Amino acid sequence: MENSKTSDKLSAFLESGIYRFENSNVVFIDPVRMLNRSYTRFRFSPSAYYSRFFDSKETIETSNSKKRKRKEKKVPHDLNEREQAATLRHQQVRPMLLKAHEFLMEATDLLAIMKGLRGDSNICSSTESSEHHSFIELGEVWQAPLYEIILKAAWKGLERVVPVFNNLVVNEASDDMEAEFLNKKYILPRESCFYMSDLGQIHNLIHECNAGFNLIVIDPPWENGCARQKLRYPTLPNWYFLSLPIKQLAHPDGALVALWMTNREKLHNFVQKELFPSWGVSHEATYYWLKVKADGSLISDLDLFHHRPYECLLLGYFHGQGTNSKQPPRLGPIKHDQIIISIPGEYSRKPPIGELLLEHVTHFKPARCIELFAREMTAGWTSWGNEPLHFQESTYFARNEIDNTS
């Protein structure tokens, strides 16, 4: 009976990308399988997504040799008040994270599958140049209003040309759509749309998409003192995010808001005392994303002071108009202290957790969902940010073998 249950869970995982550990608050997800459910004629290349943490043991030891001094220094001897609060927060969640990791290491059948997540020989990423367009830079030049994207419905032989910036670009079809911009190709999932603009133009999105979203996921480019991170993408001062029009974007009957955060105590204080109150959001629960390598080991020591192997996802209710109840009437109760385990993709890329969050938004059929500061798209979702096409470039995809439209 136990073997049958394990087999059923593995079969469900291979189909959905979600592995649920019994009698626990822990799930393991394969982002590639989850993302691929948004596409019919294309699929993500595992080798393109899993670009890290699949190195050999020897390579890892060599690349980490310069970091050993930092790893040996876990907690500074003299902590200020904010650092003490951060340490206390970590100590409270630490046993839960260790237990979740223990669940993973005991799931030997799942671990065997994990080691092969990147090695699908039937998928080969595109041979196009891997150099990406900088949409952030292009959106800031004077020609930005003139840039256009070509949308191609290959199965119908149709094309249309629309502005790519400050415009709602929609794929209304129930199939993937190819797009071309400045001689590069992009893949748009079915029934999805994006609005590419900087923060100063976000209010235009409210009128373009009629708002009324039931689920709002936000991954802000939090300000950070790390020079390496600033080279990868520009960050914004925290107070900029106070201007996000959450009240105008949310459904009048309430919305679930999910906010990605780092472990900095200053940031936690800002969100709890300023950001959520300004948005009209009440903090209800915290989820944790625990990052592991292909062999199941943590990507770094759990007790590193500045580089802990997990991030937080704060969940809250926007209560809508005319309701003072603790739980908006059309939103389900939120589970507490859920832990999501996965192998990370590229730097700063978050796992696709929309399907897990929709379990709390069951009374809206269908639910309307939006991601703010998005860098990729999902079927049925609206994506807003200054680079929502970043991970939609065709170099991340391969064409399905069953597709005969090319």
Image (spheres, helix red, strand yellow):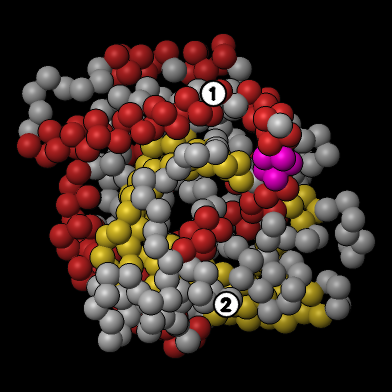
Question: In the displayed structure, would residue 95 be above or below residue 224?
Answer: above
Residues at discs 1 and 2 in contact (Cβ within 8 Å): no
- Asked whether residue 33 is drawn in magenta, I would say no
* Residue 324, numbered circle: none
Quadrant in which the N terminus appears: top right
Q: Determine the secondary structure under disc 1.
A: helix
Residue tagged 2: 365
* Residue 105, numbered circle: 1
Answer with left or right where residue 294 lies relative to residue 202. Answer: right
Relative image position of residue 100 (x, y in whole percent): 45, 32
| Residue 194, image quadrant | bottom right
State which region is magenta. 8-13
Please tell me how crowded label 2 is: few (under 14), some (14-19), or many (20+) other residues with Cα within 10 Å.
few
- The Cα atoms of the two marked residues, 1 and 2, are separated by 38 Å
Relative image position of residue 71 (x, y in whole percent): 32, 18
Residue type at tag 2: Lys
Question: In the displayed structure, would residue 162 be above or below residue 124?
Answer: below
Residue type at tag 1: Met
Q: Main secondary structure of the magenta part?
A: helix
